[in-house]
Amino acid sequence: MMGMNHNFNYINMDHHGITGDLLGAFNFSGFVPTITKITRITHNTVTLIDNVYVRIRQSEALVSGY
């Protein structure tokens, strides 16, 4: 199995076009992020850089955990 590591902050994708493009490319290929909430908070910043994706088929329904 091959993995990939990147640290794009999806909170900033409105201001950083490459980040939005990356998310769009993953979505176009059938991958969706499993973590969608802020993952790190400091006194000055918030980030969402813990990027984990799953691949789904359009016919599959997504159900989140509680």
Image (cartoon, helix red, strand yellow):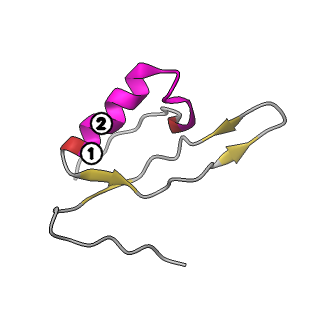
Residue 24 badge: 2
- Specify the amino acid type for callout 2: Gly
Q: Quadrant of the C terminus?
A: bottom right
What's the magenta region? 11-27
Secondary-structure class at tag 2: helix
Between the C-alphas of marks 1 and 2, the distance is 5 Å
Residue visible at 33% across and 31% down in the picture:
22
Q: Position of residue 57 (x, y in %)?
A: 16, 62
The verdict on residue 66 being magenta is: no
Local crowd size for mark 2, using a 10 Å CA cut-off: few (<14), some (14–19), many (≥20): some
Relative side of 43 to 5, left or right:
right
**Amino acid type assigned to the residue bearing label 1 in the image:** Asn
Whether label 1 touches label 2, CB < 8 Å = yes
Residue 6 vs residue 54, the one in the foreground: 54
Residue lying at 43% horizontally and 34% vertically, measured from the top left = 6
Residue picked out by circle 1: 27
Q: Residue at x 56, y 37 (%)?
A: 11
Residue found at x 50% / y 37%: 10
* Residue 39 rendering spot, x and y as whole percentages: 63, 49
Counting from the top left corner in percent of width and height, residue 19 is at 42, 28
